[in-house]
Amino acid sequence: MQGADVSEVPLQQHVVRQNFLGVPVDCLTLAQTIAVIDQAIQNRQSMQHVCINVAKFVAMRTNHELDRDVRSSDIINIDGMGIVWAARLLGVRVPQRVSGIDLMEQLIQLCALKRYRPYFLGATPEVLQASISNFRRRFEELELAGSQHGYFTKGEERDIIRNIKESKADCLFIGMPTPHKERLLARFRDDLGVPFIMGVGGALDVFAGRIYRAPRAIQNVGLEWLFRTVQEPLRLGPRYVKTNAAFAKIVSKAIAARLFSDKEIS
């Protein structure tokens, strides 16, 4: 695990927060992100992480719970080449795309190396157990604080939160859909007692081997969404068409406004 030693420097000095069309984003590399998270875990300092992609960026405009969850997070990485390209085009210096799946994988490796104990929350019982089995196979030193599938009732929430707190987990990975994750954290984030919290969406399905990631070359040209659509056309096809079109419209208006403003000034 490579990364700069930031143990003696306040976390906020490493978070380079900028504004992208009204949404805050942190311009960090993957290595820098891991270093900041590592320090938070070491210091038992509360930190919540979120990734922004095109779908989430568009959804924030109408989903107030999601918008509040993103803005209240301590690290907001850019996951999605569409956001990376648009941000750079509009003058935001994004050094690197930080994929949530890549980050989670690196953090699980970090847990195995430094004996941090993660807790997994979410997914179906089968997917959750398959993910854990695969992680343990790859990282033999990994020790879990605990796990809980995502199909629980509202009446069970407090017992689950208590279990997470009593586990003394170093990090919590939540594989629950919006808005369930946001509502859970809004009610119980301060009661969890976990230094680092990260929403991982459907990443557990990937680590369980149920869904395949696009080859790196496809990821680099920004077509990972298309690769996923081929795997789940009925569920993802309409969503991606709608969000990509909305995002293109938003970015086009911003570019046009900037060009018009520049001409007026000149």
Image (cartoon, rainbow, N blue to C red):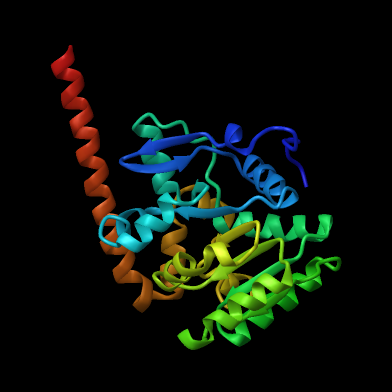
Report the residue that reaches farthest toward the right.
Answer: 141
Look at the image and tell me whether residue 150 can be seen: no
Provide residue 219's location: percent of width, then percent of height.
51, 53
Q: How many marks can you see?
A: 0
Left or right, 257 with respect to 10, comes to left
Which one is nearer the viewer's eye here, 264 or 215?
Answer: 264
Left or right, 215 with respect to 178, comes to right
Provide residue 221's location: percent of width, then percent of height.
47, 48
Left or right, 1 with respect to 45, comes to right
Q: Is residue 233 above or below residue 245?
A: below
Which one is nearer the viewer's eye here, 164 or 137?
Answer: 164
Please tell me which residue is depicted at 63% across the width and 57% down the height of the picture. 196
Report the residue that reaches farthest toward the top.
Answer: 266
What is the quadrant of residue 239 in the picture?
bottom left
Provide residue 127's location: percent of width, then percent of height.
61, 81
Provide residue 158's location: percent of width, then percent of height.
55, 80
Please tell me which residue is depicted at 55% across the width and 54% down the height of the picture. 48
Which one is nearer the viewer's eye here, 86 or 143?
Answer: 143
Q: Is residue 171 above or below residue 181?
A: above
Look at the image and tell me whether residue 193 can be seen: yes
What is the quadrant of residue 6 in the picture?
top right
Please tell me which residue is depicted at 49% across the width and 53% down the height of the picture. 51
Q: Quadrant of the C terminus?
A: top left
Please tell me which residue is depicted at 83% across the width and 60% down the height of the picture. 115
What is the quadrant of residue 130 in the picture?
bottom right
